[in-house]
Amino acid sequence: MTEQTNFNNLGIAELLIEKLNLNDITMPTAVQKKVIPEILQNKSLLFQSETGTGKTLAFLLPILQKIDESDKNPQVIILSPTHELSSQIKSEIKKISDIKTILCIGGTPLKRQMETLKEKPRVIIGSPVRIKELIYLKKIKTQSIKTIIYDEIDRLVEPEIRDESIELLKLLPQNVQLIGCSATIKPNLIKIFEKTLSSMRDDFSVEFIELPLEDILQKKITHWAIFAEQRDKIDTLRSLISALKPDKLLIFTSKTDQVANITQKLQYKKINCEGLHSKTDKIQRKSIIDKFKSGKNKILITSDLAARGLDIQGITHIIQMDLPSNDDFFIHRAGRTGRAGKNGINIVIGDGYEMKKYSNLEKKLKIIVYPKSLHSGKVINPMDLITNV
């Protein structure tokens, strides 16, 4: 019988394994088995794996293990595209390590972050813009930076932030280890980093690891389609919530201003929910997410801000009030459910145009979409109405 690969086999230290056990994490996922040994060998790599497969721990475990506690300077920079993801990464570190970690993100006073940097953090997490600014102000010393991680790397090289993400890399030591991950990595992204790093040193090489699909989108998530004209969508949503009585529901809309509109209309109907978007105050934002995570609030309405990277346990249902223009966003939205081996339901409420688009997406992603209707306070198969006539 072949011996199962465990964290000890992968070279992870006993102290970290003990902390993992306390969090009921006993066996590595496929991506962790593949990536951890490579990172421990100081290889630079980009890796792609589906949502919910354990990418965060795949890079955190080896990089935390490699930190030299005797060196009081920062040794790791972790970049992420959103405040929420940055905070979540910090929380994940706190679960398994006492290594000093701080957040350097926009929306927080620069002076306060300068003061925090005096506490000698080994790990700095945040946005490329803010971290780059602190380096230029000589508040972050870069000479001891061993590793830079781009979490949700495809978002970090989108046009509006690409220059900062790439230029930040050039401010670090030439021998820095580069790690990047996402559920969706396109070939041109690999070329961007190869070109940048090859200009920094001659012997640079970046490895690309693409994990075989576990078909989470197909096997763990059930996809529904519910037709509604634009003017009827929020009423349909309200009726759907009443019928489903979900344990934990995440609702997506592409339009930031619609977050408040949907939230207000549901609250008017005495449905307990909260809204989250890019303009939400940082303190309020944390409070909203904490309540949703803990289950004090079971319904969260959000823009695509929260679609990337947030690993909130126990989301049973996703409702998409529209279809995003980017197919990758659909994948990341749907992937907030069906995580950690559990099943989930992803629902699109759409008009005629969106239903046609959803049908095309069904073929492209090789998923099965089940049409559903609301009737007498229940979610039913539309064919049942015809059969019972």
Image (cartoon, grey):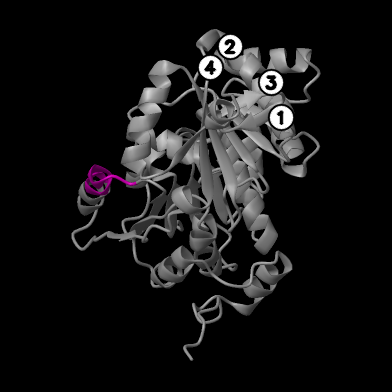
Q: Are marks 4 and 2 in contact (CB under 8 Å)?
A: yes
Residue 22 appears left or right of 189: right
Q: Secondary structure at mark 4?
A: loop
Q: Earlier in the sequence, mark 3 or mark 4?
A: 4
- Which residue: 49% across, 56% down? 55
Q: Are marks 3 and 4 in contact (CB under 8 Å)?
A: no
CA distance for labels 1 and 3? 9 Å
Q: Are marks 1 and 4 in contact (CB under 8 Å)?
A: no
If the image is split into quadrants, where does the C terminus sit? top right
Q: Secondary structure at mark 3?
A: helix
Percent x, y of residue 52: 53, 52
Q: Secondary structure at mark 1?
A: helix
User: Is 175 colored magenta in this rendering?
Assistant: no
Q: Which mark is residue 228?
A: 4
Percent x, y of residue 168: 38, 41
Near-viewer residue (186 or 281)? 186
Disc 4 residue type (three-letter)? Ala
Percent x, y of residue 180: 39, 52
Q: Earlier in the sequence, mark 1 or mark 4?
A: 4
Q: Which residue is mark 1?
A: 243
Disc 2 residue type (three-letter)? Asp
- Which residue: 69% across, 29% down? 378
Tell me which segment is drawn in magenta. 185-192
- Which residue: 33% across, 39% down? 363
Q: Residues within 10 Å of mark 2 (few under 14, many from 20)?
A: few
User: Is 191 colored magenta in this rendering?
Assistant: yes
